[in-house]
Amino acid sequence: MKRPFKVKKSKLHGRGLFATKRLRLGRLLAHPKDYGMNNFPGLNHSKSPNAKLVFEGRDDGCCDILVLRNIMPGIEITVKYGLKVGFDVVE
C-alpha cells in the first residue's frame, strides 16, 4: 500500500508528516503499521489542525488519522494534542 504521506523537516518542530497527494475532507488515513511503519513519526501539534486522531473502530490499541479539511500535497498534516480518556479526547 502506497503511503499518502511522507516524513520530512518541519518548520513547526523537527520532523513532520506531509501529504504526498491531495487528501480530501473526511478521508481516514490508516495507522502507519498498516503501511509497514511502527508509528506516526513527526505528527505535530497545531491549535488549528487539519486532521485528528481517531481511536474508535480499532481493536489493536492504535489510532487512525481523520482529515478535517482538504490538505494539498506538500502541506504538513497536524493534529491537536489531547489526553485520550476512553474514547473521548480531553483537551
Image: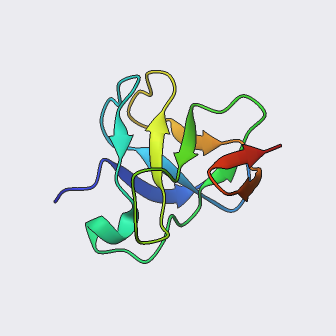
**Residue located at (77% from left, 50% from top):** 82
Residue 11 is at least partly visible in this image: no
24 in relation to 30, above or below: above
Q: For the view shown, which residue lies furthest in the front direction?
A: 86
Quarter occupied by the C terminus:
top right
Q: 38 or 17: which is nearer to us?
A: 38
> How many numbered marks, from 0 up?
0
Quarter of image, res 48: top right
**Residue located at (71% from left, 42% from top):** 80
In-image side of 42 versus 37 (left or right): right
Q: 55 or 10: which is nearer to us?
A: 55
Q: Which percent across, then down, holds residue 39?
A: 48, 71
In-image side of 67 versus 27 (left or right): right
**Residue located at (57% from left, 40% from top):** 52
Q: 63 or 6: which is nearer to us?
A: 63
In-image side of 80 versus 78 (left or right): right
Q: For the view shown, which residue lies furthest in the left direction?
A: 1
In-image side of 62 versus 50 (left or right): left
Quarter of image, res 1: bottom left
**Residue located at (41% from left, 27% from top):** 72
Q: Which percent across, then down, holds residue 60?
A: 41, 72
